[in-house]
Image: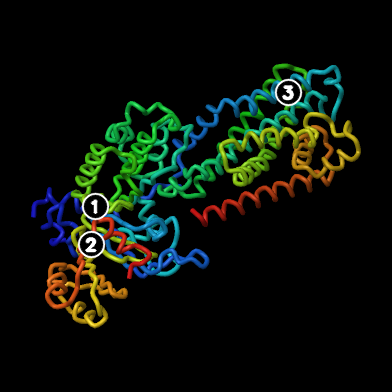
Amino acid sequence: MTTTQTLSDGAAATSPDAVTAVCLRGVTKRFGDVEAVAGIDLDLHQGEIVAVLGPNGAGKTTTIDMVLGLSRPTTGSVEVLGLEPRAAVARGLVAAVMQSGGLVKDMTVRETVAYTASLFADTRPVDDVLADAGISELAGRKVGACSGGEQQRLRFAMALLPDPALLLLDEPTTGMDVEGRRRFWATLRADAARGRTVVFATHYLEEADQYADRIVLVRKGRVVADGTGAEIKALASGRTVRATLPGAGDHAAAIGALPGVEGVDVRGETVVVHTKDSDAVARHLLDHTPAHDLEITAQGLEEAFLSLTGEDAR
Amino acid sequence: MSATASTATTARHDVTARRVPPLGGFNRTLLAIELRRMLRNKRTIFFALFFPAILFFVFGSGSDGAEAVGDGNVSAYILISMALYGGALISAAAGANVAVERALGWSRQLRLTPLKPAAYIAVKAIVALVMGAFAVTIVNVVGAVQGKAEMPLATWIECGLVTLLCTVTFAALGIFAGYLLPSENVMQVLGPGLAVLSFLGGLFIPLDQYSDVVRHIAYFTPMYGVSEVARSPLTHELPWFAVVNAVVWLGLFVAGAAWRMSRDTARV
């Protein structure tokens, strides 16, 4: 009680007393022979903006479905705000915005929101929600006659009706322009500051890096990296040093022992070194070995992402 | 330290303050919006509410309409047939909507709300019954106003209620068919399909006017049993195989709908 009261809004995430927004423990999910989720442990705190990043088929959607209570884990447990997912959904604590579908074309915008609002025990007024989403003037229009962007705003209006403590978004800014994207994230950040946890799935590392407090990288049903954008980039950052080196095999051990070196590949007369300190490797190669034709290449954000989530990731 | 600063966060933490809606989310707003949607669908309204009344004028106004049948006359007999046709059509349309909404992802969207699947089905069932009642009532009112149909009031009411009960079969058929052909155009298949079944069930033309072969096939089709059941308060005739037919088809359609739905929810 006292601990909680001394906290400022933004510090909710660090409170030891705060209920964890999402808690996954040893979660696996099998579909027949396919293991979509191979064992995930994850704690998301209240007020965090978390990006879940991973290639298609990494298990992002399956995991989100389990958090929403749309499916049950094969083994392990999922808790949302200390509750079983369906119980959290029944209390309007969890909402999600999907990228497509989920709307009936012959209902009007207002009917769709009123219909959804009527399902919750506690809900914000329909008119307020329509106004906040900027779709008041569309209220009487059939959903089928709305543009993709308008439908997306409607989905947000529906999701925000119960004032959810956890909001899950699937590729939320697809189709938005730069300005729309900026405004969208500013709104989400304001809500997060008041304690709402926002989880979004995305393909874009840049967007995750820019807007998320925390990035969870998923690959083949496992969390392969979890940290701030800077931490994730550091994990996969570094450069590649390539050189022609006669008798490369004899030098490999010494190169591998250099500070910052993550891997040494010897391919005949060519040596390829992955390192965080390319200067040290270059200096060593030129000063202490007969290496020549030296090349240094940097890894971009995309390569960092690919090296962590790609097929050949170690 | 300040109480104001902590209000927002403590409100978030206080998960227990959030309530669960009563009745699994079932409420009047849902019913009102769902009924409005059905009534707005011009094609459904025409084919289920007005078309059967028109058919009644066509088939029920002949010179032999006054001929006696059971407690009433031929015109009353045709009236019941048309009411069943309209009720079946609109119930099937309401049932098909369930599957169409699943195909659109609307059901998945609803799974992100407190609405319980049972409450959703209850809403849809009530809508199907109310619309079925509309259809049955309209044909009956048109028949009463036109004045050729004759049967005792009690028989009239009994027939109407039994007809409504029989439409449940077609609500289940609608759900089942909607799953097999999950598109917004499922009624373009169901509509003509139900017309064919209605011919075979003897709703438009008495079965004794068909050849023996066709009639014997007709005895096994889904509209035959319910039509005999619906008219039995008037005719006082109910062959045992008609009852078997009605019960078996109801069972089959309900089982089919339940089977497809359970498979579908497993996937949701």
Q: Position of residue B21 (x, y in %)?
A: 39, 47
Q: Amino acid at mark 1?
A: Arg
Instruction: Specify which label sits upstream in the sequence, 3 or 1.
Output: 1
On the rendered image, what quadrant is the N terminus of chain A found in?
A: bottom left
Residue linked to disc 3:
B55
Q: Position of residue A208 (x, y in %)?
A: 26, 52
Q: Position of residue A175 (x, y in %)?
A: 34, 40
Name of the residue lying farthest toward the right: B212
Is label 3 on the same chain as label 2?
no
Q: Amino acid at mark 2?
A: Ile
Residue linked to disc 2:
A232
Whether pointer 3 and pointer 1 mark residues with C-beta atoms closer than 8 Å, the reply is: no
Q: Secondary structure at mark 3?
A: helix
Quarter-of-image position of residue B225:
top right
Position above or below: A306 against B193: below
Quarter-of-image position of residue A86:
bottom left
